[in-house]
Image (spheres, grey):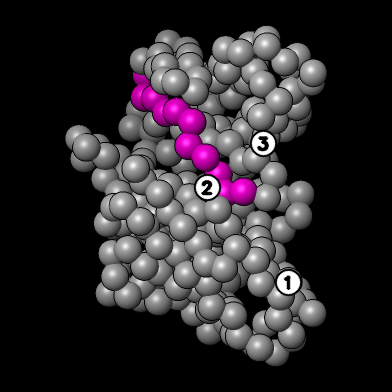
């Protein structure tokens, strides 16, 4: 159980186009979903936190108008990279969380990642 | 979240136990110690977590010192597939996980 999927797994696009990445929790309802970005040889950096039906909370330095997040249901969140440029090329990873069985903490499960290359 | 310190890299012979240390000297009483790993070009994989007691599951064991200022992740019989970056995170468990640089474990045949 606790599987998170992402689609697509990789995408190549031209500079100036927009790209949408989907994140789904397949076998559980996620209280919250998170989006991370990872550049080569670096660690994951949290971009934003999203809850179903409300606006996402972005980390400092992340442009909300460039990285649009829609959290339509308890099992689906999307990240749209608008007007992508080569510097947006990165590995984008989502995660979904749910409360533990005892409700004491959140369990966070990660998707396999989406590699975006902008030409 | 409390800051954690891990060695940059470690090597381990295949079949031997891999012991990965983590220092979290400023950990708060309500913070758990989580371990995740990331195999190249994949999303992070949950390994284990604990609060103050030692924990064991099918993947690993987690040993937390009595003062909770440090912990060790033990992979009892490392295989080549265990080669990955291992992240130790101290967090209260109700906030998003914040990743440091982790330890790059190389399992050598």
Residue denoted by label 3 = B85
Both marks 3 and 1 on one chain: no
Viewer-side residue, A7 vs B71: A7
Instruction: Kindly identify which chain the residue marked by label 1 belongs to.
Output: A
Position above or below: A27 against B73: below
Position above or below: B41 against A17: above
Span shown in magenta:
B42-52
Q: Earlier in the sequence, mark 3 or mark 2?
A: 3
Numbered circle sitting on residue A117: 1
Q: Can you give x and y, in whole percent of width and height, for residue B91 in the image?
A: 43, 38
Instruction: Kindly identify which chain the residue marked by label 2 belongs to.
Output: B
Q: Can you give x and y, in whole percent of width and height, for residue B67 in the image?
A: 44, 14
Mark 3 falls on what kind of element? strand
Question: Was residue A117 drawn as part of the magenta stretch in this picture?
Answer: no
Both marks 2 and 1 on one chain: no
Q: Can you give x and y, in whole percent of width and height, for residue B69 in the image?
A: 50, 20
**Distance from label 3 to label 2 (Cα)?**
15 Å
Viewer-side residue, A103 vs A3: A3
Residue denoted by label 2 = B98
Instruction: Kindly identify which chain the residue marked by label 3 belongs to.
Output: B
CB atoms of marks 3 and 1 within 8 Å: no
Residue B96 makes an appearance in the image: no
Question: Splitting the image into 4 quarters, where does residue B48 fall?
Answer: top left
CB atoms of marks 3 and 2 within 8 Å: no
* Badge 1 density bin: few <14, some 14–19, many ≥20, Cα 10 Å: some
**Distance from label 3 to label 1 (Cα)?**
23 Å
Position above or below: A111 against A80: above
């Amino acid at each position: 159980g606790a599987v998170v999927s992402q689609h697509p797994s990789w995408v190549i696009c031209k500079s100036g186009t927009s790209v949408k990445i989907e994140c789904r929790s397949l076998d559980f309802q996620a209280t919250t979903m998170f989006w991370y970005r990872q550049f080569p040889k670096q660690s994951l950096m949290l971009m934003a936190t999203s809850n179903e039906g409300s606006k996402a909370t972005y980390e400092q330095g992340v442009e909300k108008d460039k990285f649009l997040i829609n959290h339509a249901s308890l099992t689906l969140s999307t990240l749209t990279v608008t007007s992508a440029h080569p510097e947006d090329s990165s590995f984008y990873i989502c995660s979904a969380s749910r409360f533990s069985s005892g409700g004491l903490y959140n369990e966070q499960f990660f998707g396999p990642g989406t590699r975006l290359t902008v030409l | 979240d409390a800051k954690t310190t891990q060695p940059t890299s470690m090597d381990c012979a295949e079949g031997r136990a891999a012991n990965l240390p983590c220092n979290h000297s400023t950990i708060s009483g309500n913070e758990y110690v989580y371990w995740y790993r990331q195999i190249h070009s994949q999303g992070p994989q949950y390994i284990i977590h604990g609060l103050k007691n030692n924990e064991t599951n099918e993947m690993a064991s987690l040993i937390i010192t009595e003062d909770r200022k440090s912990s060790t992740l033990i992979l009892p019989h490392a295989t080549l597939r265990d080669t990955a970056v291992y992240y130790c995170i101290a967090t209260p468990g109700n906030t998003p996980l914040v990743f440091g640089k982790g330890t790059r474990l190389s399992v050598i045949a």
